[in-house]
Amino acid sequence: MELWIPITITAAFLQNLRSTLQKQLKGVMGTTGATFVRFGFGVPFAALYWVLLIWGFDAGVPHLNGRFAVWVVIAAISQILATFLLIHLFSLRNFAVGNAYARTEPVQTALFAFVLFGVQFSLSSMLAILMAVVGLALISVARTGISSQQLMSSNAGKTALIGLGSGTLFALAAIGFQTAARSVGSGDFVIQAATTLLVGIVFQTILMLLFMNREEIIHVIAAWKTSLMVGFVGATATLCWFAAFTLQEAALVKVVAQVEMLFAFGSSVFVFKEAINRPELVGCLLIVSSILCLILID
């Protein structure tokens, strides 16, 4: 098994854990504050990882260039906007439709890679991407009573457009961070990832602080214990994401990353004893098949 696969699975597990912790914060602060802790409280851990890696590998400060700066800024802003759009979906009546369209992120990531950098994907890789997207869409609408015909006919609706917009921005963020990480002047992929993480998360923290009011900041500080845990898990997950991005194309990383959906789905079935329906089962099987397609065939 190639190294990027277990790194991606680890990242997906940690991201699922981070999301669970962030949900706890929603009860004591607003959406902006709950989003901010992912970045602001992740800065100390990102800095610690960077220092330990530079010291541990006995490497000098890596060289950064204009290409790195441009793509970090694009990726960081895209990730913040994508997160806000995704959260906004849940306040809309037909959020399931929007969420299904947001799950087109792996396909959009592949399109960005092809259009911007001419990246070519094998037939098995393209099949894996499509299977993952269809599986995610099925799980997203499985409990809503929305048919495939309704899903297709909603593609011009506001909710669907917001979902597509969120997926597009997340895809752009993935390509941006991948390009930035690979442009870091270091021969070690972990240092490339840690450097991108540190610069990106500091920029995102400063940017979000400019738009937060005093009341939101007070709520964030009051919940510092849980926020620190979110920061630690989030920074560690992001380090793993960026490490995987330096080793493999972002679109394929995003396919394996959908194992996060299986982690969350497994919790609902085995922990909360919720029944599974046919569309959900088919969706899970498609996601598993897409991952196996990459591991065993590509």
Image (cartoon, grey):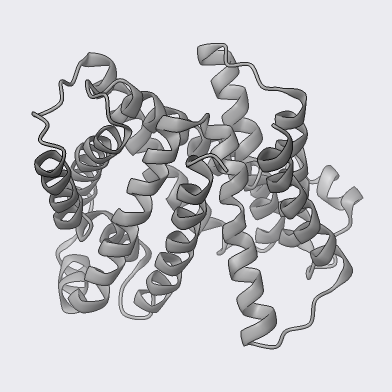
Q: Residue 231 appears at what percent x and percent y?
A: 26, 62
Q: Residue 211 appears at what percent x and percent y?
A: 23, 50
Given residues 100 and 294, the one toward you in this image is: 294
**201 above or below 61?**
below
**168 above or below 208?**
above
**176 above or below 218?**
above
Which residue is pictured at 62% across the width and 23% down the height? Answer: 111
Question: In which quadrant is the C terminus drawn?
Answer: top right
**272 above or below 246?**
below
Which residue is pictured at 67% across the width and 64% down the height? Answer: 93
Farthest top residue in view: 118
**Drawn side of residue 86 relative to residue 24, left or right:** right
**Drawn side of residue 56 relative to residue 31, left or right:** left
Which residue is pictured at 77% across the width and 43% down the height? Answer: 131
Question: In which quadrant is the N terminus drawn?
Answer: top right
Q: Residue 123 appears at what percent x and percent y?
A: 77, 24
**Drawn side of residue 15 relative to residue 52, left or right:** right
Query: Does residue 196 appear anywhere in the picture?
Result: yes
Which of the 4 image quarters holds residue 55?
top left
Which of the 4 image quarters holds residue 91?
bottom right
Given residues 42 and 22, the one toward you in this image is: 42
**Drawn side of residue 8 relative to residue 158, left or right:** left
